[in-house]
Amino acid sequence: MTTSRRDINSLSPAELDDYVHALGILRARSAANPDDETGYDFQAALHNDMFVGPCEHGNDLFLPWHRSHLYHFEKLLQESDPPRTANVTLPYWDWLHPETTGKFPAAFSLPGLVEDRNTVATALPPDTLDIVTTETDQGEFGGFPAAHPGGDFGRLEFGPHNFMHGNYIGGLMADPSTASMDPIYYSFHAFIDLLWAEWQRRNGSPAPTSPDHDLRGFLSQEKHKVADFADTVALGYRYELTDRLKADFDVPTPQPVVRRLLAAQPLSLVSAPSLTASLRADSRAEFSLAAPPAEARKVMVRLDDLKVPVAGSYVLRAYVHPADVAFRADDPDFADHYGVGYVTMWKSHRTAPDDRPADGRPQPHHPTECNARFDVTAVLAAAPAPEDLVLTLQYLPSPDPYGRPQEAPGLLQEVALKDVLMEVYG
């Protein structure tokens, strides 16, 4: 039987009550026995378990690991109190289309679903639909194998996923050590999974790049390899799309382009001794950008070995503009014309408070360094004089977990990278 995961705003009061009832049973198990593997706290701790290692971030295992986590958690909900809970499914939160006057769906104010979160009005991450509907490269979308030389994080994770955790939702979700203790985690990641399922549908469901890899935390389960989580229908569920999502996805998919790397050229800082000095002066850094060769079919800017911060999270927004055009990030026309993307550096793992069992011993939750890339092909093609362009990186510290200005004086010192490169593909 194939079940449907639906938008949380479409659930009836009775359906929401059954969902909260199932969550309550799992919480009661943890209260009675913290080591109960079918309890809420144990399942949440899988997101950063001290024995099996943290969940997967920063590579091609990110999407299948979280699909696995949701799948096994949903089974526990269904088996918690049948027949009442037999048809419970994880509702997704479509954060692209807010349907209530509040920042979060009304359901997340109900007992059993409510937590302290960032309630300050926050702009949603840009380009999310564009990532799903126009990106045809599997690695660029969902992440590269860990040994891949060209990058590791995919655009879906580095962009909207990390931004929503660190900038929009906040609360427990702002910290990877405690994120999955908030029940909104499951609805948020169900929507990430929906976006992946839609991308798979649009791109012919390409085979996963690490099919035989064991997913940490689930080795005792019959389904525990990446290949086991390549198809939602084979797992027994599908997503019921709202009319607005159907309209969003009703656009053609570009033809994939096979490309090969021709050259990678380092970019130089303009009028600054170091990245940190430039960011400290005015929260941005400029790099000179050379004109690409005529045979270039695609041009990317790569931030090489970005350090994953510990003190807090931050966003780097990237713009490519003529050197004689003043930087005006607050001007929508400037941002629309010259913006080429953003990367959210979600903070690394830390030791959680004693009352938050989602943590284990201190260990990195993410890789300690990672790469990010921006496609600058269109901006370069539209520029009348590509040789006069600069790349500007704007530094924006994320708010604290409750939306207040972040007080992390050491964060700026953690904004570090090895190189900024222009990659030319033919």
Image: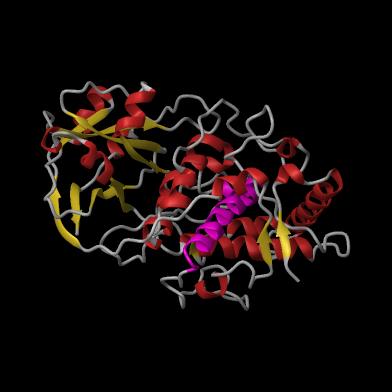
**Could you tell me what secondary structure mostly forms the magenta stretch?**
helix
Q: Indicate the colouring scheme.
A: secondary structure
Q: Position of residue 319 (x, y in %)?
A: 28, 34
Q: Position of residue 281 (x, y in %)?
A: 22, 23
- Does the magenta run of residues contain 199? yes
- Looking at the picture, does residue 153 appear above or below residue 407? below
Quadrant in which the C terminus is drawn: bottom left
Q: Position of residue 29 (x, y in %)?
A: 77, 59
Q: Position of residue 87 (x, y in %)?
A: 81, 61
Q: Is residue 178 visible?
A: no
Residue appearing at x 74%, y 39% in the figure: 107
Numbered circles on residues, count? 0
Quick check: 235 left or right of 375?
right
Quadrant in which the N terminus is drawn: bottom right
- Does the magenta run of residues contain 143? no
Q: Nearer the viewer, residue 198 or 418?
A: 198
Read off the magenta span: 178-205
Q: Nearer the viewer, residue 28 or 328?
A: 328
Quick check: 2 left or right of 103?
right
Write down the quadrant of residue 247 in the picture: top right
- Looking at the picture, does residue 208 appear above or below residue 43? below
Residue appearing at x 55%, y 30% in the figure: 402
Quick check: 24 left or right of 211?
right
Residue appearing at x 39%, y 38% in the figure: 311
Q: Nearer the viewer, residue 171 or 189?
A: 189
Residue appearing at x 35%, y 65% in the figure: 146
- Looking at the picture, does residue 387 appear above or below residue 369? above
Q: Nearer the viewer, residue 305 or 320?
A: 320
Q: Is residue 121 visible?
A: yes
